Image (cartoon, grey):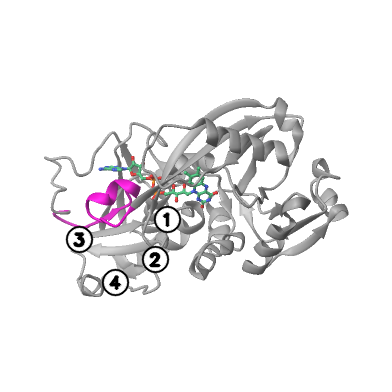
Amino acid sequence: MRVTVIGAGVAGLACAVELAERGAQVEVLERAERLGGACCSWFAGGMLAPWCELESSEPLIATLGAESIEWWRKHFSATAARGSLVVTHSRDGGELTRFARRTERFEWLDEEAIAALEPDLAGRFGRALYFREEAHLNPRAALEALEQRLAALGVNVRYGVDAYASGTGGEGGPAEGAWVDCRGLEARDVLTDLRGVKGEMLLLKLPELILSRPVRILHPRIPLYVVPRGAGVFMVGATMLESDQPTRISARSVLELLSAAYALHPAFGEAEILELGTGVRPALPDNLPRIERRGNILYVNGLYRHGFLLAPALARRAAEVVLHERLYPEVMRNEDSRQRRLA
Ligand SMILES: Cc1cc2nc3c(=O)[nH]c(=O)nc-3n(C[C@H](O)[C@H](O)[C@H](O)COP(=O)(O)OP(=O)(O)OC[C@H]3O[C@@H](n4cnc5c(N)ncnc54)[C@H](O)[C@@H]3O)c2cc1C
């Protein structure tokens, strides 16, 4: 079966891989001129943290997200399965207890155990939560790995192509085969309840500091995190602003991000700022992902703050819907259109 995937963010690339690995004849169309040129996925932290996310998400996120770690380890060998840490300074100690009440699959660590896991954090925190089974990855390298996997499967990613531009025939859907639309927030023209949740992030360079796993720093107002990228580079993220403004970064946000890094370790005061970035997360009203069929087009969207965490589970399901007409009520919507056959 011929399938065109629209959008080379994490959702589109993961769908293309799952479809091609099942034998579909796949092509990916991407409007930007290069990988990461205009996608939210380029700015992600890359945390694969299904159980931490229970703190502010529905159980479905953990259920779907639990599939992701094995998938990423298979498709991107640099996926680091070293767990994640959650810390807070003692004056906000209640935050850690509250976080623990809402999440699962963690261990409490004392100061000594924290130092054993992360020697550079020795003496800085009295208690922490350790989510041993969680993982993280470098999103940019992971997207490149998916693109390479697609090339090995014979799938072409065509850049600089707006799939719905007039003259492409895309206005009413494909003339043959199926389309899988993974345009993120751009799919608002059809999925009218999509909204943007902007996230600002920093990349810092501090070769003197070594961290092996993501660390979340809880604070009643600004819970933020630091993710090690290797070679002395750290991603600090991320704000959550109800906005679809894609570029502007406020001084307040930079202040908050830098304060979080500094609260984690004062050595960050000497870090070099490599990048300030923003992405706009595509979110649905319930902040849950959705696979929705309309005619010959299957929409995979609403990945919100969980794109890398959820893309594997959604891509598997989307491929089964397209190729084998399977139904997944937990993520699918629109009972009538579900029953319709793809071309
Ligand atoms: C700061 C920040 C930190 C984050 N941290 C994490 C994290 O730690 N873990 C996690 O799991 N998630 C994280 N996320 C969320 C994650 O990044 C998103 O959920 C994910 O990127 C959404 O992916 P997507 O493929 O749906 O959309 P996008 O990545 O936006 O991709 C959509 C693609 O479609 C293309 N496109 C649009 N219109 C057309 C068209 N007409 N024709 C062809 N192509 C088109 C766009 O150019 C784009 O490349 C974070 C997000 C941000 C902003």
Three-letter code for the amino acid on which mark 2 is drawn: Arg
Residue drawn at point x = 80 percent, y = 43 percent: 121
Q: Earlier in the sequence, mark 2 or mark 1?
A: 1
Residue 315 can be seen in this image: yes
Q: CA distance from mark 3 to mark 4?
A: 12 Å
Q: Nearer the viewer, residue 177 or 192?
A: 192
Q: CA distance from mark 2 to mark 1?
A: 14 Å
x and y, in percent, of residue 225 in the image: 63, 46
Lateral position of residue 324 relative to residue 65, left or right: left
Q: Earlier in the sequence, mark 1 or mark 4?
A: 1
Q: Which of the two discs, 2 and 1, sits closer to the camera?
A: 1
* Badge number at residue 325: 4
In the rendered structure, which segment of residues is drawn in magenta? 174-194
Three-letter code for the amino acid on which mark 4 is drawn: Glu
Q: CA distance from mark 2 to mark 3?
A: 16 Å
Q: Nearer the viewer, residue 323 or 234?
A: 234
